[in-house]
Image (cartoon, rainbow, N blue to C red):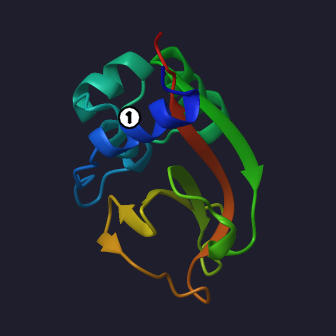
């Protein structure tokens, strides 16, 4: 019988993330990140959330993942290297007030629905704010 840790590893290996773009000029980074994680279409996620634009980490994304079979953990962070794999990262843009953006960290790469796959962000233009790590629940 395999342990819970081994089951998580099996799930992670099977769940290869496929990059998706949020589309130019949209505010669907949260929905797009959820689509990459769950495999649901962006349109389906918009409908399930009741939102076609801005989403929030704690009031929209966290409950959506938990309702769909994931365990989550929220933490504040100030350095990119402190963000674990299998996390949704909320970025701040220091040159724009009240602007945030979601990206997904998997296997030490960021799947940014606005710009593509990123191996490293410039910390002068984007700052990490907080992250939500996730694991798919193990079904026995």
Total numbered labels placed on residues in the image:
1
Outermost residue toward the top in this view: 140
Give coordinates of residue 25: x percent, y percent: 29, 59
For image coordinates 28% across by 49% down, the residue present is: 17
Q: 119 left or right of 43?
A: right
Which of these two is toward me, 83 or 45? 83
Q: x, y percentage for residue 12?
A: 39, 42
Query: Badge 1: how crowded within 10 Å, few (<14), some, or many (20+)?
Result: some
**Residue drawn at 65 percent across, 61 percent down:** 98
Q: Nearer the viewer, residue 99 or 6?
A: 6
Q: Position of residue 70 (x, y in %)?
A: 52, 26
Q: Position of residue 7 (x, y in %)?
A: 46, 30
- Considering every residue shown, the one lying at the far front of the view is 1
In the rendered image of this protein, does residue 11 appear above or below residue 32?
above
Would you say 54 lies left or right of 20 here? right
- Which quadrant of the view contains residue 104? bottom left
Q: Which residue is mark 1?
A: 11
Q: Residue at x 64, y 52 (%)?
A: 131
Figure quadrant of residue 57: top right
In this rendering, would 128 be left or right of 18? right
The secondary structure type at the circle numbered 1 is: helix
Task: Determine the residue positioned at 22% across, 31% down.
Answer: 41
Q: Is residue 96 above or below residue 23?
A: below
* Rendering quarter of residue 56: top right
């Amino acid at each position: 019988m395999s342990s819970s840790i081994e089951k998580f590893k099996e799930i992670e290996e099977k769940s290869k993330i496929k990059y998706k773009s949020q589309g130019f000029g949209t505010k669907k980074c949260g929905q797009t990140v959820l689509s990459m994680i769950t495999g649901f279409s962006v349109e389906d996620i918009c409908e399930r959330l009741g939102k076609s634009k801005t989403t929030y980490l704690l009031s929209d994304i966290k409950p959506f993942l938990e309702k769909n079979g994931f365990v989550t953990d929220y933490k504040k962070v100030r350095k990119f290297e402190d963000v674990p794999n299998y996390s949704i990262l909320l970025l701040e843009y220091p040159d724009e007030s009240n602007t945030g953006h979601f990206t997904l960290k998997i296997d030490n790469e960021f799947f940014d629905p606005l710009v593509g796959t990123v191996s490293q962000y410039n910390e002068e233009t984007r700052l990490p704010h907080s992250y939500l790590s996730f694991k798919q629940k193990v079904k026995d």
